[in-house]
Image: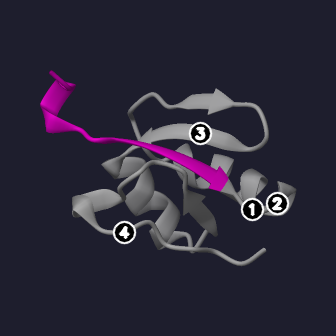
Amino acid sequence: MKPDGASMHWIQFANLTEHRRAIGALLDVYREYQVLPDSQFIVTDEHIKALEKAKVRFKYLSRTARNGQKPKRVRS
């Protein structure tokens, strides 16, 4: 079971600029996240909210996005 009901999301940032902006936005979240090669991250719902608030562009690599929605396609 996931702690506190947190969902996990596999995401990727459009470019290095967005990757750097994401690091700043993610510092405001008190949960751990996992960094993978090629600007890919494993994050929680809280991280997704912080990224959306900071207007960081990313795409979902997970099969489903938050709340079971289809993943959003982001143009680079």
Residue 37 is left or right of residue 68, and the answer is: right
Give the residue type at disc 3.
Phe
CB of mark 1 within 8 Å of CB of mark 2? yes
Name the foreground residue: 44 vs 73. Answer: 73
Give the residue type at disc 2.
Asn
Q: Secondary structure at mark 4?
A: loop
Magenta-drawn stretch contains 20: no
Q: Can you tell which of label 3 and label 4 is closer to the viewer?
A: 4
Give the residue type at disc 1.
Glu
Q: Residues within 10 Å of mark 4 (few under 14, many from 20)?
A: few
> In the rendered image, which residue does mark 4 sit on?
70
Residue 39 is left or right of residue 9, and the answer is: right
Q: Which residues are magenta?
A: 1-12
> In the rendered image, which residue does mark 2 sit on?
15
Give how far apart the Cα atoms at labels 3 and 4 are: 18 Å
Name the foreground residue: 29 vs 46. Answer: 46
Q: Can you tell which of label 1 and label 2 is closer to the viewer?
A: 2
Give how far apart the Cα atoms at labels 1 and 2 are: 5 Å
> In the rendered image, which residue does mark 1 sit on?
18
Residue 25 spot, x, y in % from top left: 57, 55
Residue 18 spot, x, y in % from top left: 74, 62
